Amino acid sequence: MDNENNGMGTAPKPNKFKDTIDGLKKKADIGVKWVKNFWKEPPKGRYLNLKEILCFGGSAFGVSTLVTVVSGLITATQISELFGIDVIHGPYICLVASLLGLIIQPLFGKLLQNTQTKYGKYKPFIILMAPIFAAFAIAATWSPDGIRELGFNATPKIIYAYCICTPTLILWNLFQNTFYMMPGVVTPNQQERTDIWSPIGLVIGFSPTIMNVIGNALRGYFNDLGMEYMAFRYIGLIYSVVGLVFVLLLFKVRERIIATTENKEKTGLFEGLGMIMKNKPLLIFTLALVLGCVRTTIEVDAAILGKLRYATDIPTGQIIFGSLTLITGFAVTPNMILLPFMTRKFNNKTILIFWMSLNAIGYAILGIIGVENIAQGTTSAVLLTLFRFIALFNALASLQPLMLSEISDYQQLKTGKRLEGFIQMFAYTLVLVFTNVGYVAIAYIKQGMGYQPNNYFDVQTVSDELMKIATDYFDIALWISAVSAALMAIAMIFYPLGKKEHAKIVEQLKERSREEGLFDLEETATPVPASEAAVDGSLPSDVSEVNEEIFKEEATPKEENTDDLKF
């Protein structure tokens, strides 16, 4: 009190707002410095810097864009639509392509296994195949006028469809499967694979979602003009060119494989096939994929479902369906965002069982209700979109390459060779054969019911009879999808490879490589020391904690590497 009376005053009050702003500025400065360092140097325990990650993501967008031309437009159903041929021919074309692919894939796998270049194993093949695949994709979607104007199921139409679509589908399979090997070779760190591949998965999923929106809008527009085929032409051309440009970013991505003497040795065709037959995780995973190969049967005809049920006229229904694919297309988005966190807490098989259960539940509920019992228009648009979203709520396309990279690591430990090309034959090509066999069987069901996709192409309305045929088929397709997803979930219960087992595999591979004097990946994973960073401008000492926290590596159990893994 005396001090106040003597005019000594009080201490100034702290300015909380200013302190907050200063704190935010400091954190922003630290973040900027961290990003600058990350642009050139990977964080501790990691292998890819930011520049390489962005190039990898850009190339993934290019691959996805090219692949989407086929997966979005050259399907078992849409081949019949686009070329005006019987419903049975689309599935048969896909089956012929997959059977030829099954013959080609082991030879291609042997070529991949025995290839050693300064650019890597896979990049040269991906980049060389890209322009060839793009040319075929454009040709497959650009049906010549002379062919198109022939009558329904005319022989020249059938011959042209087989001749152009079969090689396109073979290249589509080889091209995308080879690219999906990349997550397993850009880094040996499985958590880094997941952390990088999950956001890249968002990029991969972005392309088909946008195609659905733009493509269905274009189809609705050209449908009004009686020229729906023109939408296929424009989309095929634009997507192929854009995709080809982005694929070239793969030049900036480096392959990193833990080298072992055996993995560098040449592998014979039958030798490689014999080796992967001993890979129990691969065999169980392949069986699960085969059982689940028709789990999205209804999605093959989703565009027809949408334009028939989402509105009372087909052009409007097509536009509404295209708009709502933003919702169903982004069903994978939450899972891709959460995948790095999910893989830290759960084994891959647990995640996959959860996803397949949702797949089965979503389609089963719609099957119980019945498409014909949902009012045409807004009610159908809302309910069908909602339950399709639940059924499609997964990121299998992102998780599968990560699981196959683990399986390749296991293969390398067991046999000394990674054999990715042979593993791809089982997990992708063989599964694709079973998928197309299933779709051929389903095509006979369609044919027996009188369901011809061509009847719903380039028309404004359909008769009550054609509508009933379509809704009856949709109900059957929903149940096929639900049962297939449930069987896949059951099979995955027996999958033996988990996080702990894979961590042991990687440590044993590193130890074996060190003993052979081949291990050099540690150099790429070492960050600039914090004490030196202030001098060279890369990473100041106050950023090191941020760097450690954001890229905290999973603790690997330190165990003896002499014990082999038993599955």
Image: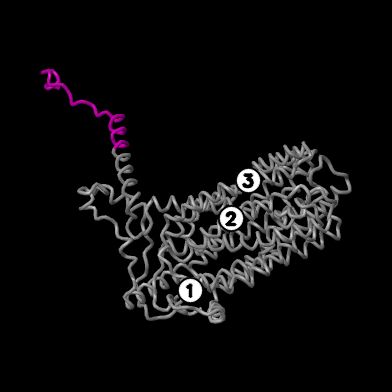
Question: Which badge, 1 or 3, comes first in the chain's sequence?
Answer: 1
Quick check: is 364 in the magenta stretch? no
Residue segment shown in magenta: 1-25
Looking at the image, the residue that sits furthest to the front is 146
Classify 498 as above or below 141. Answer: below
Q: In which quarter of the image is residue 254?
A: bottom left
- Asked if the residue at tag 3 contacts the one at tag 1, i.e. Cβ–Cβ closer than 8 Å, the answer is no
How busy is the neighbourhood of tag 2: few (under 14 within 10 Å), some, or many (20 plus)?
Answer: many
Residue 344 seen in the current view: no
How busy is the neighbourhood of tag 1: few (under 14 within 10 Å), some, or many (20 plus)?
Answer: some
Residue 154 seen in the current view: yes
Which circle, 1 or 3, is nearer the viewer?
1
Question: Which badge, 3 or 2, comes first in the chain's sequence?
Answer: 3
Q: Position of residue 480 (x, y in %)?
A: 74, 61
Residue on which the image places disc 3? 211
Q: Which amino acid does label 3 sit on?
A: Met
Tell me the number on the disc at residue 394.
2
| Callout 2: SS | loop
Classify 265 as above or below 294. Answer: below
Question: What residue is drawn where x is 57% and y is 48%?
Answer: 241
Q: In which quarter of the image is the N terminus?
A: top left
Q: Distance between the residues labelled 3 and 2?
A: 20 Å
Quick check: is 23 in the magenta stretch? yes
Q: Position of residue 506 (x, y in %)?
A: 40, 70
Q: Which amino acid does label 1 sit on?
A: Asn
Residue on which the image places disc 1? 114
How busy is the neighbourhood of tag 3: few (under 14 within 10 Å), some, or many (20 plus)?
Answer: many
Q: What residue type is labelled 2?
A: Asn
